[in-house]
């Protein structure tokens, strides 16, 4: 399998999402919580879904998505205004693949 080095240079703010949201409270059971724990839990319930922390590095699927977008955006015959042109979906699929990343497709499973 080939290996490639991809170097990203931020030109603006960036966010490499993840499944983790910012939480400050512990996972204590309600009966074991102190007053401070309850305040932190209230904070999490109010703001937990709004305050997130970016992963330091992008996930493999993010990199592949960026590469697919770059390939398409450099092809004016297939792509304009951040969209695949009408009637050009099959050609675009031939260029970047029909499906998104799937780990099972990367390795031969016996």
Image: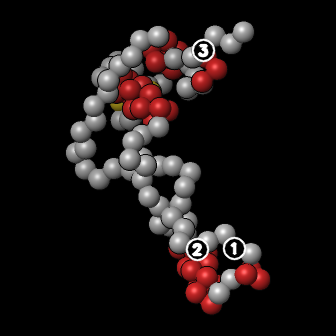
Check disc 2: other Cα within 10 Å, few if <14, some if 14-19, many if 20+. some
Q: Residue 58 appears at what percent x and percent y? A: 42, 40
Q: How many marks?
A: 3
In the picture, measured across the screen, residue 28 lies left or right of residue 36, that is right
Cα separation, mark 2 vs mark 1, equals 8 Å
Between residue 84 and residue 40, name the one nearer to us: 40
Q: Which mark is residue 71?
A: none
* SS state under label 2: loop
Q: Which residue is mark 2?
A: 25
Between residue 1 and residue 13, name the one nearer to us: 1
In the picture, measured across the screen, residue 19 lies left or right of residue 109, that is left
* SS state under label 3: loop
Q: Which residue is mark 3?
A: 107
Quarter of the figure with residue 35: bottom right
Q: Residue at x 53, y 60 (%)?
A: 21
**Which tag, 3 or 2, sits closer to the chain's start?**
2
In the picture, measured across the screen, residue 19 lies left or right of residue 74, that is right
Check disc 3: other Cα within 10 Å, few if <14, some if 14-19, many if 20+. few
Q: Which residue is mark 1?
A: 28
Between residue 73 and residue 101, name the one nearer to us: 101
* SS state under label 1: loop
**Which tag, 1 or 3, sits closer to the chain's start?**
1
Residues tagged 2 and 1 counted as in contact (Cβ below 8 A) = yes
Cα separation, mark 1 vs mark 3, equals 41 Å
Q: Residue 7 appears at what percent x and percent y? A: 27, 31
Cα separation, mark 3 vs mark 2, equals 40 Å
């Amino acid at each position: 399998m080939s290996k490639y080095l991809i170097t990203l240079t931020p030109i603006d703010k960036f966010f490499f999402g993840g499944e983790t949201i910012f939480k400050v409270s512990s996972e204590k059971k309600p009966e074991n919580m102190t007053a401070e724990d309850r305040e932190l839990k209230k904070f999490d319930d109010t703001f937990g879904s709004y305050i997130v922390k970016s992963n330091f590095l992008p996930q493999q699927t993010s990199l592949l998505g960026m590469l697919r977008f770059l390939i398409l955006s450099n092809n004016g015959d297939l792509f304009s205004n951040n969209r695949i042109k009408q009637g050009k979906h099959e050609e675009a699929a031939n260029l970047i693949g029909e499906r998104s990343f799937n780990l099972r497709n990367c390795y031969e499973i016996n």
